[in-house]
Image (tube, grey):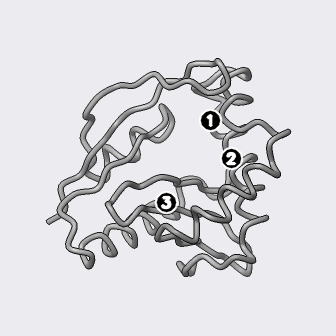
Amino acid sequence: MEIRAYQESDISQLISLFYETVHSVNKQHYSQEQLDAWAPKEERALKLNAWSTSLLQNITYVAEMNGWIVGFSDMTVEGHLDLLYVHKDFQGQGVASALVNKLEMEARELGLHEMDTEASITARPFFERHGYPLIMKQCVERKGVFLVNYRMRKKLI
């Protein structure tokens, strides 16, 4: 597995990976209505435009195996870990850990003392194992549908 910096040409693969991951991996914790609000397939073009900008502004890495992107993650320069998605067929293989470790290293190099994220129900155990204690449970609204997530923060040493 190679962790490398995001390139603009990656965007289509990342959008596809996002939709497939949300609608497969997260279905164990969220209803179909919630998944459709979180990742509405009819808004793919809007997501493409929005992420094209944000992924370039943020510190963004992709995980690649045999020429295929199997995961990606990004972080703001303030230390907010925004996106972390791993392809459904590569769950539990260290992809997310490698991406988060890379972003934590970047955060330390920026002189940051902590990182935070808003983790899904599905991702919460992963972040807890990686030293992100729960700050608070949240209920966020997407397209009139409410989804639970968790504000988590890690002190960097």
Relative height, residue 36 to residue 108 (above, below): above
Judging from the image, what secondary structure is the residue with disc 3 in? helix
Q: Residue at x 64, y 40 (%)?
A: 25
User: Horizontally, is 129 left or right of 35 in the view?
Assistant: left
Q: CA distance from mark 1 to mark 2?
A: 7 Å
Task: Specify the quadrant that holds the C terminus.
Answer: bottom left
- Label 1, residues with CA under 10 Å away: few <14, some 14-19, many ≥20: some
Q: Which residue is mark 2?
A: 21
Q: Residue at x 55, y 81 (%)?
A: 4
Q: Quadrant of residue 68?
A: bottom right
- Label 2, residues with CA under 10 Å away: few <14, some 14-19, many ≥20: many
Name the kind of residue labelled 2 in the image.
Answer: Thr
Judging from the image, what secondary structure is the residue with disc 2 in? helix
Q: Locate residue 76, reporting x and y percent.
A: 41, 62
Relative height, residue 140 to residue 154 (above, below): above
Name the kind of residue labelled 3 in the image.
Answer: Ala
Q: Nearer the viewer, residue 138 or 3?
A: 138
Relative height, residue 47 to residue 105 (above, below): above
Q: Residue at x 64, y 75 (%)?
A: 64
Q: Which residue is mark 1?
A: 26
Q: Locate residue 3, reporting x and y percent.
A: 53, 78
Q: CA distance from mark 3 to mark 2?
A: 13 Å
How many marks on residues? Answer: 3
